[in-house]
Image (spheres, rainbow, N blue to C red):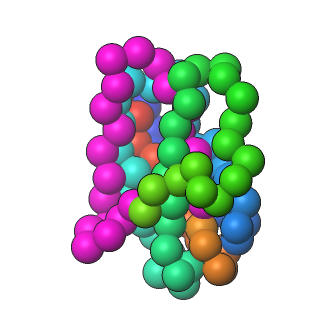
Amino acid sequence: MANPIQISLDADTWTLVASNVTEGRLKKLDNRPNMYLETYRMHLAAPPVDLSEGVPCFTGTYRENIEAAAGIDVYIMAVGHDGKVRVDIS
């Protein structure tokens, strides 16, 4: 497993947090955002541009798993306030 990294997220902006991964874990480190949104793309596909492309994550938990059959790029958005996540990649 690679070393975990902490990624600061600008409010209301999609941020690439993991690239070309098939499994791993996301952990919420900052509770200030109203919510976090998550989406993914196949590796090297065009990144998301709109809020509607995401689904809520960290709802009722501080951790989300990453699982995919092929390499994906994972994006997170902190809504309403800057945020921070930790990314653990297997």
At a point 45% along the width and 56% down the height, the residue shown is: 55
Horizontal and vertical percent position of residue 89: 40, 34
Classified by dominant secondary structure, the portion drawn in magenta counts as: strand
Horizontal arrangement in the rendering, residue 68 relative to residue 71 (left or right): left
Residue 88 in sight: yes
Foreground residue, 14 or 52? 52
Magenta segment boundaries in residue numbering: 57-77
Q: Is residue 87 magenta?
A: no
Horizontal and vertical percent position of residue 87: 46, 47
Q: Residue furthest front?
A: 52
Foreground residue, 80 or 53? 53
Q: Is residue 61 above or below residue 76?
A: below
Quarter of the image where the N terminus is located: top left
Q: Is residue 72 magenta?
A: yes
Horizontal arrangement in the rendering, residue 28 relative to residue 78 (left or right): left
Horizontal arrangement in the rendering, residue 14 relative to residue 78 (left or right): right
Horizontal and vertical percent position of residue 9: 66, 62
Residue 5 in sight: no
At a point 70% along the width and 71% down the height, the residue shown is: 11
Horizontal and vertical percent position of residue 60: 26, 73
Q: Residue furthest top?
A: 70
